């Protein structure tokens, strides 16, 4: 009596594709970059784009993985913006200290991304809300500017 053992049969072409797709998608979540994930999974970038155009199931799984990987990248950006990045300081070829730098541009980009409406309203003003120094403003002028900003946001 012969025994069927599916484990010993070679995978079908469809099964190989699913395994390659799964490997790529796992790397995409881990790395957050299509190029890096494709390279790590030993899959050509063009192959990934072919799958996206031809396979709706892969496209759905790709979008989930892409956003999950994007969340990881965003988490890292927030961490760096809020807590800074430690960088070595060298003198005559030797490390003598470390400094913590806070990437202001990164923080600004994150704020603009998360608070689009608020920053779009502020950027939309063509004229300054107040002429002169903020130190010279009366409480009434401060309330009026706050009211204008609230209306826009």
Image (tube, rainbow, N blue to C red):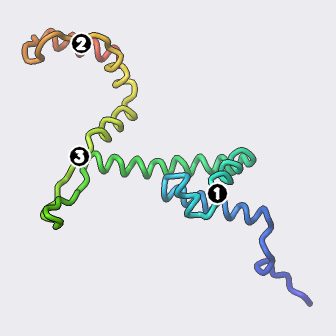
Q: Residue furthest bottom?
A: 1
Q: Earlier in the sequence, mark 2 or mark 3?
A: 3
Residue at left offset 25%, top offset 53%: 85
Q: Which numbered disc covers residue 44?
A: 1
Circle 3: is it few (<14), some (14-19), or many (20+) Cα within 10 Å?
some
Upstream in sequence: badge 2 or badge 1: 1
Of badges 2 and 1, nearer the viewer stands 1
Q: Nearer the viewer, residue 99 or 118?
A: 99
The answer to whether 7 is drawn above or below residue 61 in the figure is below
Residue 24 located left or right of residue 3 = left
Is 56 left, or right, of 9 in this rendering?
left
Q: Residue at x 49, y 59 (%)?
A: 30
Task: Give the foreground label among 1 and 3.
Answer: 1
Q: Secondary structure at mark 1?
A: loop
Real-space CA distance between mark 2 and mark 1, rounded to the nearest whole angstrom: 51 Å
Within 10 angstroms of label 2, few (less than 14), some, or many (20 or more) residues?
few
Instruction: Check the image and report above or below for 60 versus 39.
Output: above
Residue sitting nearer the eye, 109 or 114: 109
Q: Position of residue 61 (x, y in %)?
A: 63, 51
Residue furthest left in the image: 136
User: Dot 3 corresponds to which residue?
Assistant: 102
> Going from the N terminus, do you reach mark 1 or mark 3 first?
1
Q: Secondary structure at mark 2?
A: loop
State the CA–CA distance, disc 1 to disc 3.
36 Å
């Amino acid at each position: 009596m012969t025994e069927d053992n599916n484990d010993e049969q070679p995978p079908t072409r469809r099964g190989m594709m699913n395994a390659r797709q799964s490997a790529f998608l796992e790397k995409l979540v881990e790395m957050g970059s299509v190029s890096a994930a494709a390279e790590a999974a030993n899959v050509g970038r063009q192959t990934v784009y072919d799958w996206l155009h031809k396979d709706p199931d892969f496209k759905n799984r790709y979008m989930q993985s892409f956003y999950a990987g994007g969340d990881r990248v965003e988490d890292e950006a927030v961490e760096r913006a809020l807590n800074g990045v430690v960088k070595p300081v060298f003198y005559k070829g030797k490390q003598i200290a470390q400094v913590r730098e806070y990437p202001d541009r990164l923080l600004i980009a994150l704020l603009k991304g998360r608070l689009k409406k608020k920053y779009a309203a502020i950027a939309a003003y063509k004229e300054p809300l107040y002429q002169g120094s903020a130190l010279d403003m009366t409480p009434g002028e401060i309330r009026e500017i706050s009211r204008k900003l609230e209306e826009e946001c």
